[in-house]
Image (spheres, rainbow, N blue to C red):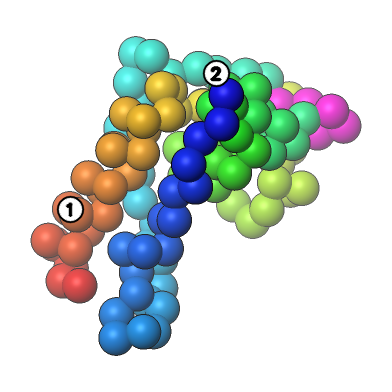
Amino acid sequence: MSREYFDRYQFFIENGNFKIVPGLQLEVKGTDRYILFRSNKDRLDKLSQEYYGSPTFGWLIMVANPTITGTEFEIPDNTYLRIPYPLVTSLQDYKRAVDLYNLYYGQ
């Protein structure tokens, strides 16, 4: 199943310049999935493909796991990861978090 590209940076461009992308939190949903990350086997693009039908949403998985810092290569082995699910609802949640951030802190 193919998905359209979602440009998460579109919300952080002002006068042609990129603003800093803030750390946002996604609310936990009862439909979210959880996996035990195996550093020698799993990659975020593969998880994104498996759960969303597209390899481009690894960033969304990272946003849903704020205790993981750095890159996917620094995720400790046997870490439980939350996969925000379903995709469309999770992208709407992300957009809502962006809107709230902008409301509180300005654009």
**Residue 87: image location, x then y, percent:** 42, 29
Tell me the residue at 55%/41% (across/down): 57
Is 43 in the magenta? no
Packing grade of label 1 (10 A; few <14, some 14-19, many >=20) is few
Q: Which mark is residue 100?
A: 1
User: Is there any visible trace of residue 62 in the rendered image?
Assistant: no
Tell me the residue at 28%/38% (across/down): 92
Element assignment for label 1: helix
**Residue 81: image location, x then y, percent:** 58, 28
Q: Is 59 rendered above or below residue 84? A: below
Query: Disc 2, disc 1: CB below 8 Å?
Result: no
Which range of residues does the magenta coloring cover? 37-41
**As drawn, is 74 to the left or to the right of 11?**
right
Q: Which mark is residue 34?
A: 2
Q: Is 101 rendered above or below residue 14? A: above
Q: Which mark is residue 54?
A: none
Task: Find residue 36 and report its image quarter.
Answer: top right
Tell me the residue at 42%/55% (across/down): 8
Secondary structure predominantly adopted by residues drawn in magenta: loop
- Cα separation, mark 2 vs mark 1, equals 26 Å
Q: Amino acid at mark 2?
A: Tyr
Position of the C terminus, as image quadrant, is bottom left
**As drawn, is 84 to the left or to the right of 93?**
right
Tell me the residue at 81%/33% (across/down): 39
**As drawn, is 41 to the left or to the right of 47?**
right
Element assignment for label 2: strand
Q: Is 65 rendered above or below residue 19? A: above
Task: Find residue 46 and report its image quarter.
Answer: top right
Task: Find residue 53 and report its image quarter.
Answer: top right
Marks 2 and 1, the one that precedes in the sequence: 2
Q: Amino acid at mark 1?
A: Leu
